[in-house]
Amino acid sequence: MKRLLYSLLILLVLLTAIVLQILHSGGFFRKVAPGFEGNIIQKIKLPGAEDIAISREDHFLIVSSDNRAARRDGQPEQGGLYLVDLREEPLSPKLLTERFEQPFFPHGISLLRLDSGRYQVLAINHVNEKHTIEKFLLSGDRLVHENTLSDESMVSPNDVVATSANTFYFTNDHRHTTGTWRLMEDYLGLRQSNVVYSDGSSYREVAHGIAYANGINYDENRNLLFVASPRDFLVKVYATNPGGKLSLIEDIDVGTGVDNIEFDESGTLWIGAHPNLMKFASYASGRSEIAPSEVIQLTYRSTGDYDVNSVFLDDGSIISASTVAVPFNNLVFIGNVMDDELIVWER
């Protein structure tokens, strides 16, 4: 009897340790004290503005919008890509995909300037259990669908970045799409997700062993690829090599659940983040009305030489579950998972 009680006690201690580790690694014990310098000057009506890309040359944003709350509740609405002209006042979104008749629930996006006035737009699309990347050509304010890209490597695609007109990388945030293994990836932080490279016709895994590979972006000036791992609170830095191969340079502990990655004019990374992944999960499932938000800056100079600064923190009262932050002059556009608006923060 004593041996049984002793074994049960050990089991209880182990289970408690596992639960505490899950909560700690998900930011559950972090106190979110709202704070930022400046003011929120506008809220742009768009549901689930999860990703934003910018053209500073031509002064516009492309916004990926999907009403995830409605889709979660069994009432899916067609999502869309929107253009926001940064020269207008007040800022107003214009739907670009009104002629795109396929079911469209966009997630991560990429904007690549091809030449003067023409851009390639890539958008992750989730339709039930089928995942694709939709390829568009943007000229002025006219968006034309060119191709639907699909491959068995698109298991659970999250974000995409084009490195040329024909090449791109995308992240899969899970290896398993349903069941116990997916839950274990989420809550135990199993490092099962990956990065896939495509030359436009073939696809191959170029990085793996990542806990929830999320946002991805490419610094063409330094040939560096940055990948967000929110479950490990890391930004992973890779060198890009011929043929799309990647070499891991280092993992940067940023202390928050990083999501999409954008750059400012100086090459500093701006990242929307979830400081408490447990509250984010509760919010995303509909059990909580709000979730905290954070924006961080990562100034990366070289291996081991970088600065990480939290510049925006909110308990969810202003914006819940921030996913992306795009700076433009003294403005920062912050998107989210399921709020009805994206916000414009004037620093």
Image (cartoon, rainbow, N blue to C red):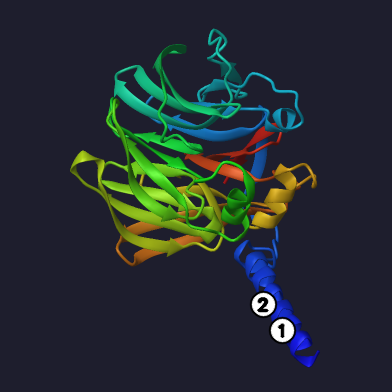
- Could you give the CA–CA distance between mark 1 and mark 2, rounded to whole angstroms? 11 Å
Which of the pair 101/130 is nearer the observer? Answer: 130
Q: Residue at x 54, y 21 (%)?
A: 81
Q: Residue furthest front?
A: 1
In this picture, residue 227 sits left or right of residue 320: left
Q: Residue at x 72, y 84 (%)?
A: 7
In this picture, residue 325 sits left or right of residue 145: right
Local packing at callout 2 (Cα closer than 10 Å; few below 14, some 14-19, many 20+) is few
x then y, percent, for residue 248 = 31, 57
Image position of 59 with respect to 16: above or below: above
Amino acid type assigned to the residue bearing label 2 in the image:
Leu
> Quadrant location of residue 145?
top left
Quadrant holding the N terminus: bottom right
In this picture, residue 161 sits left or right of residue 337: left
x then y, percent, for residue 100 = 53, 11
Which of the pair 74/69 is nearer the observer? Answer: 74
Judging from the image, what secondary structure is the residue with disc 2 in? helix
Q: Is residue 294 visible?
A: no
Q: Residue at x 60, y 56 (%)?
A: 184
Q: Earlier in the sequence, mark 1 or mark 2?
A: 1
Amino acid type assigned to the residue bearing label 1 in the image:
Ser
Write down the residue under mark 2: 14
Q: Residue furthest left?
A: 242
Judging from the image, what secondary structure is the residue with disc 1 in? helix
Q: Is residue 254 visible?
A: yes
Write down the residue under mark 1: 7
Local packing at callout 1 (Cα closer than 10 Å; few below 14, some 14-19, many 20+) is few
> Quadrant location of residue 200?
top left
x then y, percent, for residue 269 = 43, 49
Image position of 77 with respect to 157: above or below: above
Mark 1 or mark 2, whichever is nearer to me: 1
Instruction: Kindly indicate whether the residue at mark 2 contacts the one at mark 1 (C-beta within 8 angstroms).
Output: no
